[in-house]
Image (tube, helix red, strand yellow):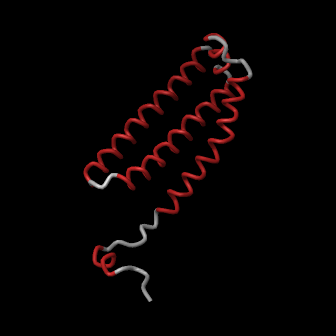
Amino acid sequence: MKMQSDLGRVRGLGSAKSGSSHWWAQRVTAAANLPLGLWFIYSILAGHTASFDAVHAWLSSYFHATMMVLLIISVAWHFVLGLQVVIEDYVHNRKAEVVSMLLIRALTAFMTVAAIISVLRIVFAGA
């Protein structure tokens, strides 16, 4: 007994075998964002970020810099995964879908690299 429709068989559409990995990646990044986000909020509320010099000293710590880089990567990847789902669900023109995904991935990669370089410049400027 086949569970695929006739149209799906003709088009060759079936299980893409990648949906579960996308689903898991989105859940893993969401789970990582929770403790990283709580760390960031706690750090902000703890008053370490009262002035530019305080932020610079706080982010110069290897622990805080590592946590910040992990937060940047996790949030960026979660962002891309979430927008991919929105685009796949609501953009019905194939060219617009491909262009949108390429733009989102390129812009997110650029912003992620820029943010990580900024953190590393702060860390290694004091070294």
Residue 31 % position (x, y): 64, 48
In the rendered structure, the answer to whether residue 53 lies left or right of residue 105 reads right
Residue 54 % position (x, y): 67, 13
Residue 62 % position (x, y): 67, 26
Q: Quadrant of the C terminus?
A: top right
Seen as rendered, the residue at the extreme bottom is 1
Q: Nearer the viewer, residue 88 or 52?
A: 88
Q: Is residue 79 above or below residue 3?
A: above
Q: Nearer the viewer, residue 69 or 87?
A: 87
Residue at the (63%, 27%) spot, across then down: 65
Seen as rendered, the residue at the extreme front is 90
Q: Nearer the viewer, residue 111 or 6?
A: 6
Residue at the (33%, 75%) spot, across then down: 8
Seen as rendered, the residue at the extreme right is 46
Residue 91 % position (x, y): 33, 52
User: What is the quadrant of residue 68 in the picture?
Assistant: top right
Q: Is residue 92 above or below residue 78?
A: below
Q: Is residue 48 above or below residue 17?
A: above
User: What is the quadrant of residue 58 in the picture?
Assistant: top right
Residue at the (38%, 50%) spot, across then down: 87
In the rendered structure, the answer to whether residue 11 lies left or right of residue 14 reads left
Q: Nearer the viewer, residue 5 or 105?
A: 5
Q: Quadrant of the N terminus?
A: bottom left
Residue at the (56%, 41%) spot, across then down: 74
Numbered disc total: 0
